[in-house]
Amino acid sequence: MNINELKDIVKRLVAPGKGILAADESSKTIQKRFEKIGVESNPETNLAYRKMLFTTSGVEQYISGVILYDETIRQSIDGIPVPQYLESKGILPGIKVDQGIVDEITTGLDGLSERLTEYKNLGAKFAKWRAVIVVGQEDTLIEKNAENLAKYASLCQEQDIVPIVEPEVLMDGDHDLEKCKEVTSKTLKAVFAKLVEHGVVLEGVILKPNMVIPGKESTVQASPQEIAETTVKTFLETVPTQVPGIVFLSGGQTPDEATKNLYEINLIGGLWELSFSYGRALQDEALKAWAGKSENVPAAQKAFLERAKKVSLARQGNA
Ligand code: 13P
């Protein structure tokens, strides 16, 4: 393990004003997204859409890294393999390596070491593994998911790939802010205990958590200020100071909510870089504007660039 190389990748990913675009939707997930805009998902249409995102001129001012899916990391843009295309813009390519969720537990450890070697040869500099915690089922889900996250992170670091450690407490349900805090706190404590137990070097990981936020069906919603205060407080109680960066997922928040909440979080600040690794919140507007038509590419790129700029400003505590 080359810790300096890991630290350098982390530093670039959470550089001032920059964050990550999660474009690693699985085949099933991108199909669901495309259904909403009436577009058939296949490797060609998936690439046309992602090419629209990646070739957006100027987006590299705001985006430091892109998480790719297995299909995309093997595709090319105008004859250039996608990872090398991104690198040429100064954007680091990353790869989703988990293989989905079975009975609420994230899988993908079988053969992971070999897959990481292959992805590294294809150009991946960092990886992502997402575990989900359903509020109400946390007692049965946290330990096993934390263990798998730690095993994954350790295998990544062995190959000088930065692991993004993503334990997502879902927004599904009617729980309140306090309950989300309690479950997020338990989850993070378990995850860091397992990371340490498995010898993971914390200076060489990025944490990708949920914001602490009430469930979507909760009758008591919270203001962006309350969300920000509770989120930062939870991290101060659970996230070791050696962790260099925290990048939030958007988790079903609207683009405006995810932007506003990130802004409020950065007004408070913390011991870590507090940035973003958004999927839906960065893409929703661009996806709608694109609607599967090549003539809509300029409008879609404009929407994507505008949102990326807003999120980048929020990440710096600027509105
Ligand atoms: P969302 O921002 O849409 O939650 O996606 C982030 C992600 O990578 C989930 O694994």
Image (cartoon, helix red, strand yellow):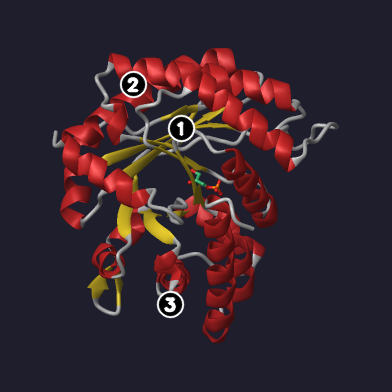
Helix, strand or loop for disc 3: loop
* Label 3, ligand 1: CB separation under 8 Å: no
Check disc 1 and give the amino acid type: Leu
Q: CA distance from mark 1 to mark 3?
A: 33 Å
Q: CA distance from mark 2 to mark 1?
A: 19 Å
Check disc 2 and give the amino acid type: Leu
Helix, strand or loop for disc 1: loop
User: Is residue 167 at least partly visible in the picture?
Assistant: yes
Name the residue: 26% across, 70% down: 88
For discs 1 and 3, the disc positioned in front in the rendered view: 1
Name the residue: 64% across, 23% down: 181
- CB under 8 Å between callouts 2 and 1? no
Quadrant the C terminus occupies = bottom right
Of pointers 2 and 1, the one earlier in the residue sequence: 2
User: Is residue 210 found left or right of 153 in the rendered image?
Assistant: right
Q: Which residue is mark 3?
A: 57
In the image, 237 versus 126, the foreground residue is 237
Of pointers 2 and 3, the one earlier in the residue sequence: 3
Of pointers 1 and 3, the one earlier in the residue sequence: 3
Quadrant the N terminus occupies = top left
Helix, strand or loop for disc 2: helix
Up the image or down, 114 lies above or below 303; here it is above
Single out the residue that lies furthest toward the bottom: 295
Q: Which residue is mark 2?
A: 195
Q: Mark 2 packing: few (<14 Cα in 10 Å), some, or many (20+)? A: many
Single out the residue that lies furthest toward the right: 219
Residue 155 place in picture, x, y as percent: 23, 31
User: Is residue 147 found left or right of 270 in the rendered image?
Assistant: left
